Image (cartoon, rainbow, N blue to C red):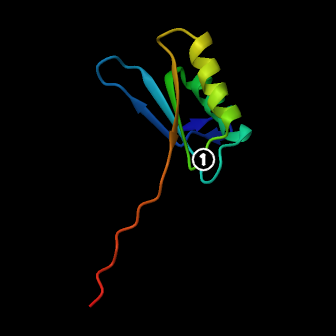
Amino acid sequence: MPVGLYSADIVAIDVGSGRRLVIENQFGRADHDHLGKSLVYAAVLGATNVIWGAERFTDEHRRALDWHNEYTTDEVGFYGVQLTEWRRAHAVS
């Protein structure tokens, strides 16, 4: 979904409440760039929840998500999801 000159990876809408959710995907280790993008997308789109997916999170980024959850209302949530790649094993003939 367009956000100014940028584009949010995934925006979902809860049909019952109409509340928006922003999902920011990232390959590799979490970085400040994607944290900032998540915040901007949430602010511009009026999202009440942010899910940031990355392969690895640093302690500093975990603390940043905790801080946001501690100092915002209960109606707003920030989540970090550690992603793992799974591959199907190929049968050997």
**Amino acid at dot 1:** Arg
Q: Closest to the observer: 58 or 27?
A: 58
Q: Number of numbered discs present?
A: 1
Q: What element does badge 1 sit on?
A: loop
Give the residue drawn at x 56%, y 17%. 69
Tell me the quarter of the image containing the C terminus.
bottom left
In the depicted structure, whether residue 36 falls above or below residue 89:
above
Q: Where is residue 18 in the image (x, y as percent from the top left)?
A: 37, 19
Q: Closest to the observer: 28 or 41?
A: 28
Judged left or right of residue 65, residue 91 is left
Judged left or right of residue 8, residue 13 is left
- The local crowd at label 1, few if under 14, some if 14 to 19, many if 20 or more residues have their Cα within 10 Å, is some
Judged left or right of residue 93, residue 6 is right
Q: Position of residue 50 (x, y in %)?
A: 52, 29
Residue at the front extreme of this rendering:
59
Residue at the top extreme of this rendering:
73
Judged left or right of residue 87, residue 43 is right
In the depicted structure, whether residue 31 falls above or below residue 16:
below
Q: Where is residue 51 in the image (x, y as percent from the top left)?
A: 51, 33
Give the residue drawn at x 35%, y 25%. 14
Asked which quadrant contains residue 88, the reply is bottom left
Give the residue drawn at x 48%, y 53%. 84
Q: Closest to the observer: 65 or 21?
A: 65
Q: Where is residue 74 in the image (x, y as percent from the top left)?
A: 48, 10
Residue at the bottom extreme of this rendering:
93
Q: Name the residue under label 1.
A: 56
